[in-house]
Amino acid sequence: MSRFEAKKPSVCESEPLTCERVRATLGVLKGIVTSCYGPSGRLKQLHNGVGGHVRTTSQSSALLHSLAVTHPVLKLLTASMQNHVSCVSDCGLFMAILCCNLVENVQGVDVTPTTVIELNKLLVNLCTSYLKSEACGCRIPVDFSSTQILLGLVRSILISKPACMLTRMEVDHMSTLVLRAFLLTIPEKAKEHIILGRSIIVPLKGQRVMDSTVLPGMLIEMPEAQLMRVLPVKKSSALKVALFCVSLSGDFSDTGEGTLAVSDGVCLESAVLDQLLNLGRQLVRDHVDIVMCQKVIHPSLKQFLSTHHVVAIDRVGAARMEPLSKMTGTQPIGSLGSISPRSYGSVKDLCYAEFGSKHFFHLLPDEVTVSSLLLCNRNDTAWDELKLTCQKALHVLQLTIKEPFVLLGGGCTETHLAAYIRHKILNEPGSVLIRDDGRTQTELQLIAEAFCRALESLAGCLEHDGGDILTDMKYGHCWSVQSDSPPVANWPDLLSRCGCGLHSSQEQLSWSFLRNTHDPFVLQSCLPPEAGNSANNLTLDCYTAKLNGLQLAVETANLILDLAYVIEDKN
Amino acid sequence: MPLSSLRKFPTNRFFSAYWADRSIALSCRAFPSNGSVEEEGQPNQKGALAGIPVSSRPFRFRHRFASWRSGCYRSWQPEVIETGMAMPAVGSVKLALQVAEVLESIVSKCMGPEGQQVLCTKSTGEVLLSRDGGRLLEALHLEHPIARLLVACVSSHLKKTGDGAKTFIIFLCHLLRGLDATTDKETDALVSENTQAHGRHWKNCSRWKFVSQALVKFQTQILDYFMDQCLSRHFLSIFSSSTKEKTLCRNSIELLLEAYFCGRVGKNNHKFISQLMCDYLYKCMAYTSGIEEVFELVDDYFVELNIGVPGLPVSDSKIITGLVLHRDFSVYCPADGDVRIVIVTETIQPSFSESGSEFVLNSEAQFQESQFWIMERTKAIMKYLQNQNIKLLLSSVKQPDLVTYYADLNGISVVECLSAEEVSLIQRIGGLSPFVLPPICSQHEISNTALVNFCKPLIIKSKRYVHLGLISTCLFIPHCIVLCGPVHGLVEQHEDALRSAFKMLRQLFKDLDLSYMTQTINQNSTPSPLICNSRESELFEETGNDSIQRLCRDPVVKNKDELAIVETHLIYSNLEIPSVELETHIPCSTPQLIPVDTYQTDDTLRGLSQNKTRMHNREPLIPSKSTDRPTTQNTKIEMSYENVQVKKSVGMRNTLPLSCKSLESCNSSSISAGCVLPVGGNFEILLHYYLINYAKKCQQSEETAVSMIIANALLGIPKILYKYKKGKYSFPQIYVRSLYALQTNQPMVCTQTGLESVAGKYQLLTSVLQCLAKILTIDLVINIKRQPQKVYEQDSEDEL
């Protein structure tokens, strides 16, 4: 069909990266993301000019969700980052900064984009194969017999989100809680495929962070008055549970496509209510103790049930249906007629709990795979940030179960990788350039240098207070030093530990400023055997997330570098 | 077109405001980023952007489209004619050339293995990466009428073949340029005679009309002849043997796909994606034969057969065995072993009243009874399904809670809300039809069931899918592709590329009929006035200068030993100069090998040939007496080889069989299924070579001109492909070497590995020629107000 409103023609822009405007906007975005990076990152306040919610954050997911970018190239970058975060939760800023750095660093280099793209791919393959290899010097296998590493991982995530406004003690408390909440979701009886349960975050705003807690089982919030009315009977054995997915309110929605004529004097309401009460009688006959309904329970039925000492909980909501049915072993009932006895499930206990001003039913299952994390923080903004961080940490823990490794944090992985690439390119360029496809060694060295600089400046981004970043010439780790250090310094005294905390400055090392060029050196690649044990104070990063971030950053940078035109739809 | 002249167009204040906001802003960089300015192959860039210093920053100008409006196009609106504005001196060719040149400058950057990506934004703000010509042209939302005509032509071509949008534009642009160049010369001569602009315009129009007719004639008659008679001997086949059974050669499929994806997806990913597609193809094929069905099915249900996952690196893409439905289980009951499934398209629970009927409730008891009946009925059906050992219920509609509850009780998994496509895909693979509810739940066997090996949830990036190991009843073994990428735009690009690759393969595996008929048929019918018999045979003499055909014309040489000799020649050098022994039978084989220019004068030698009667048969209407004309013989001989595998070394890492014509196609010619040529402009150079030779022989000047223009325009494509190559691999070098090879009957030079479909190329050529013919016949674009955006085509002769 012909359209009546003429479409506006698109705007076509060639070679976007050569445009000053695009570079400038990329620079602005890079400025935003770099300043947020790391534990000492600066916070961003997001607010709407016409009022409403104000949000303080330094997390990529929150930041980019509300940031409206205009230029298509930036859209590409932010979309890529958001997809990354939605897949692996962590390392969003890492990915964005690396991508910006890669694009920026090759701007001055006199190599065609085609070559840059191909070499970038070779380099990232080099990195990933190193990170996946046994010989990797910045990867620690997770020891599940102790909680040290997992705790270190959670703590690193919490510390790196300054907008949560946590003190050192609160960080320790919260990381223990998050880890416990996660561990409760692992089923005790190990089968072939472990199906993890779920931990549900229950908001409790306005309390102290230290009041946060973890409970096994599920909490369902109830108004106090209702709670008082349905005091549960104490029973020694397990409680029988019926879970309804169909509405018990007596509504009568589905009558088919034809019409339904009701004769005069016929009262359908009473007919339906009769049916509901019959159902209630059956439930009582079957000795059900708790009746839960996704939707609404008719007040008369509720009344009927409570007079027979059956607890009725309604408006559970669709989101909680699946964990509830898993936890209690019920089949959600979709019938108002006869109920098969097989549909009933059970819980170990039902108690009444009070946290802050809120009242809850606490369902305690036989086998715990569901945990409730009661999260407290002082104000809404900090609570939002904390909730996001906890969700992120829980997801990261899940990923770590799948791939049981962690990477050294604090910039050490980045500098270590850069040192590895430099060494490899200088000493074994033949192993990198596999085929002779017209790429010269000079080109490889130029691009590898740009790539390493991009990685190293990531480590540099962790420093926001004017300090300097050094790297040692043995492990390739990252060390930070105060800005007012004397020019000729006694490094072992000034530095204490490296970024990740694995090495101390008293190990007879030599240092060099990261910004200075230094000769490639042979990496001491094997980790000290006590790495896993001393992980108590290590800064750690999620392996899966960082690997994914690295690959995506390079792929996105390659896409941006490969653009010949940008066609913008102006409709 | 120089910038200065663009600016010189008179601006009409009446329309300038109207057009100003609609003009396309194009900013073009002066020269390629690496600073190497090509000496040839880019006349457009040079011409268009002359005068801009190389080092200048990207120069943004709202140029050409705007200028056309201020210039030619606008003045062709009827109102303007009334106001007595001067007629433009140029016809539609100049106009079309300007449009095509802008489009060419965009698509040529994305062309070939060195092509770059284009980032498009949709009106929704989503970003999309693309190198697909069709998509780019659509994304531009062009307003210019000729541009829109072009886009329409390209998209209709794409619908047919799934390939060649960029080549389309480039080829068309070169054709227009060629046409424009010829007119420039002629109009110079005309100017002095006819200064009246108005008259000249119409004169031009009628001239273009003739050119257009000549083009159509060329496309319908001469081109097919070339395909059948000249080019066909260079064709290679994708099948591993030339037997009747079409068996795929994996190596050649890989080469074909790699070359295809080279121009479709980013440089880093094309190898990976083509490998993925190749794996997918082989996994889906039950046998090496019957591939067409697989292609058809994948092409039809591509959306259902792939899952896009943004946020993971491209290298995480994989192939999954079985079918993945983009839904989650409503009820999941784990089941071991083979699982029986049924499909329903209606709700199982009966409702109170059917559509169009009325249900009268007279009492509460009746209501309760009805509800009870509904419940019992639902229960009975589900019980019945369970008794029939059904473990999975697929539904295209949402089932009521009651149904899912009883399904759960009876251990039946349920998947609801399947799309119509998913349902029809399952039906097609599993060979089952929707289950119709029985009036009474008897113990009868349900016939409409299918089996699945497994049925389990699949979690990709925390999204749940249903994973079915459907047992196929057809030639397609179900597999799904999971495509990953950093952004959705890239995933979509890969999806598009894969989809059109299937479309391309589907085309490739079909025989393409040509309208050209070999002589036996033509003799009975009246030969066309354009191609008289004599010229054809003459042409054949000249182009078909290989000894085999000669040899076979001789009735003496019929025994198999002789044929075997020829065969060996074929194997070693494709079209080698015949051995002395063979030459004795063929007195006139030598002159065929001498250069074409001298051949024309060689009347005596031609007379020596056995079929001299036909040589002199220049009157088109006199049917030739002999029935075994050389051309027919030629094809027949080629056919007689079909049980002998003829191999040809193409200078690539594998050897491919020459495509042999099957016996059936001896009369009506066709491009047989699976015909391919090496990439890198081989097709274009070949056709160019034969066309140039033809043009030299041609009598009619108009035909010569058309052939020459087409021949030269064809070179534009390899020119762009070799743009960044240097030294030995630069275009002039390749061109000279190829021509030399053709003249001396050596195998063509081949610098790139990879293959492309001949049928696709042929279709592209015909589409371009048709499009050009269409453009040329338009003389007036009338902008109408009431019905927006409709362009009428007018015949210039009607106007006159």
Image: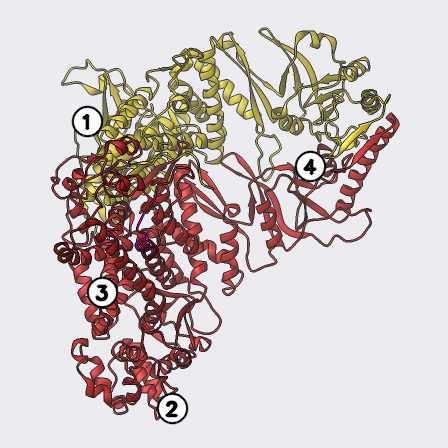
Q: Chain of mark 4?
A: B
Please name the residue that numbered disc 3 is placed on. Answer: B705
Residue A351 visible, this angle: yes
Q: In this rendering, is residue B442 above or below A205? A: below
Instruction: Indicate the secondary structure of the residue bearing disc 1.
Output: loop
The residue carrying pointer 2 sits among few (fewer than 14), some (14 to 19) or many (20 or more) residues within 10 Å by Cα, namely few
Going by the picture, which residue comes out furthest to the bottom?
A: B556
What amino acid does circle 4 point to? Answer: Gln
Instruction: Indicate the secondary structure of the residue bearing disc 4.
Output: loop
What amino acid does circle 2 point to? Answer: Asn
* Residue in the image at 75% along x and 34% along y: A258
The residue carrying pointer 4 sits among few (fewer than 14), some (14 to 19) or many (20 or more) residues within 10 Å by Cα, namely many
Q: Are marks 4 and 2 on the same chain?
A: yes
Whichever of labels 4 and 3 marks the residue nearer the N terminus, that label is 4
Q: Is residue B777 magenta?
A: yes
User: Magenta part of the protein: which range?
Assistant: B774-780
Q: In this rendering, is residue B516 above or below A550? A: below
Instruction: Indicate the secondary structure of the residue bearing disc 2.
Output: loop
Please name the residue that numbered disc 4 is placed on. Answer: B399
Please name the residue that numbered disc 2 is placed on. Answer: B559
Colour representing chain A: yellow
Q: Is residue A250 magenta?
A: no
